[in-house]
Image: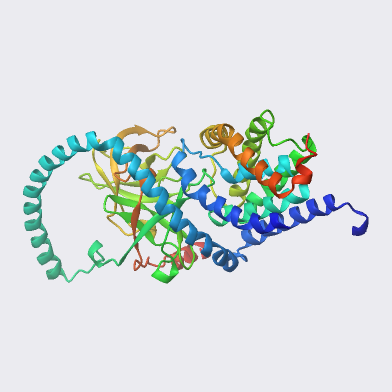
Amino acid sequence: MAIYYIGFPVLMLVAVIDATFMQLFRLWGGAPSLMLMVIVSWALVAEIEDALPWAVIGGVMRDLLSVTPTGSSAVAFVVIVIAIDRTFPKINWHNIAIPPPTILVASYVYGLMLFGFHRMAGWDVPFLDGLWYVILPGAIMNFIAILVVFRLIGGINNFLRPQRGSMLR
Amino acid sequence: MIGNRSPRTVAIGTALFISITLVILSLLGTLSPAESLGRAPLTFLENIFGNLSGSLDSTADDIAEIRSLRTRNLELEEALADYQAELAELREIRSDYDRLIALLNYTTQTPSDFRYVTADVIGRDTAGVVRTIHLDKGTRDGVATGDPVITELGLVGRVVKVSATGCEVLLITDSNSAVNARIQNPKRDVGTVRGTLSGDLVLTFVDPDAQIGVGNLVLTSGEGQNFPADLIIGQVTGVSLSDDELFQQASIRSLVDFSRLEFVLIITNWEPVDLSVFEDTTEAN
């Protein structure tokens, strides 16, 4: 249960860090997304029942600090969590092979879904330019930073659920 | 039936249902009060973190720029001397202008009539594809949707979302932004300044016969009543024909550094003329 008490303030903080500190690393139109890295890391180490609430709450928090319709990021995060659950078994938090390619794909899935939601909300989104000008730099920065975030989230999960951690492959 | 389903399926179904419902309600606009309420604590935190990240950013910049700033300071001192002479001359012209305006009993809203609220930039849109900034002033400070936002160097954008304690500003560099503009050339030609995905500004829909010169200032025209007239947008840096060769277009360089905005001014008392009555007439015809 502790995981849910921790989750809310942590996600709130992550959303704010995404809108402030992470914007200092903006390259072209893209910036690293700590929220996406947290959600992907959590989906890789925890059960889907634990990861989904983080995806929904984290997505809503992120959208509240954006012009994106509320819930758009939540839908995208939920889709990513489901895809990860179907693709990989739960991995050990020392794993360094799976998180980087996963975040690369997740960045594109998330970016493309957000483009779609922006279009639905009436924003003009130059689709092809956005692929390389916005999503690519963000995906590369996520790729570089994911292992740090993954180790941190894996550590938290291991601390909160030690019995499950010991069974990890 | 639900009792037969695994907790995993129920969790997936619930998460998808909640998320999609939120998107639909948000698109319909019914979530606005709840969004405003939910944004308040985030804006509070964003204010604290925004100041911290702003200080961090400016400290790093300051260290890197000390040498270039010294040279720049010398250049500016020389320029200041020139401008002071020009200012004296312009004051004389302004004095003549004021007297003539008084004679004509002509009233207009000038920058000195505007009421400004100073706001700190506390964050930026996380989506990347939309160029917006978050400010620490909201409805409590008199800010409303549509309010123009400027700095002493020129136009920044307009407020698109507002809560009690904060607001979101769509920058003029965003590709969704369009500002009716006037070129400060002898014929005072007009056009539309649009943002691009790369953050550059382009002046489009300018008459092909217009004489646009590199260095010409571009100001808001006030047409369409999206912004007050005569706010500086930027300076022309290059001119070309549009792809279909029906119009001229020019690249514009704003004096505002949009990536390093720290504080801005929100004009809170500008009231656009309601043009909807004319649109209705056109539709009726």
Left or right of B166? Residue B217 is left
Q: State the residue at coordinates (63%, 42%).
A: A110
Q: Nearer the viewer, residue B171 or A22?
A: A22
Q: Where is residue B207 in the image (x, y as percent from the top left)?
A: 33, 41
Left or right of B210? Residue A40 is right
Q: State the residue at coordinates (64%, 31%).
A: A100
Q: Nearer the viewer, residue B176 or B60?
A: B60
Q: Is A67 above or below relative to A45? A: below
Indicate the quadrant where residue A86 lies: top right
Res. A137 in view = yes
Q: Where is residue A151 in the image (x, y as percent from the top left)?
A: 63, 38
Q: Nearer the viewer, residue A131 or B55?
A: B55
Q: Position of residue A28 (x, y in %)?
A: 46, 35
Q: Is B106 above or below relative to B210? A: below
Res. B258 in view = no
Q: Position of residue A95 (x, y in %)?
A: 69, 31
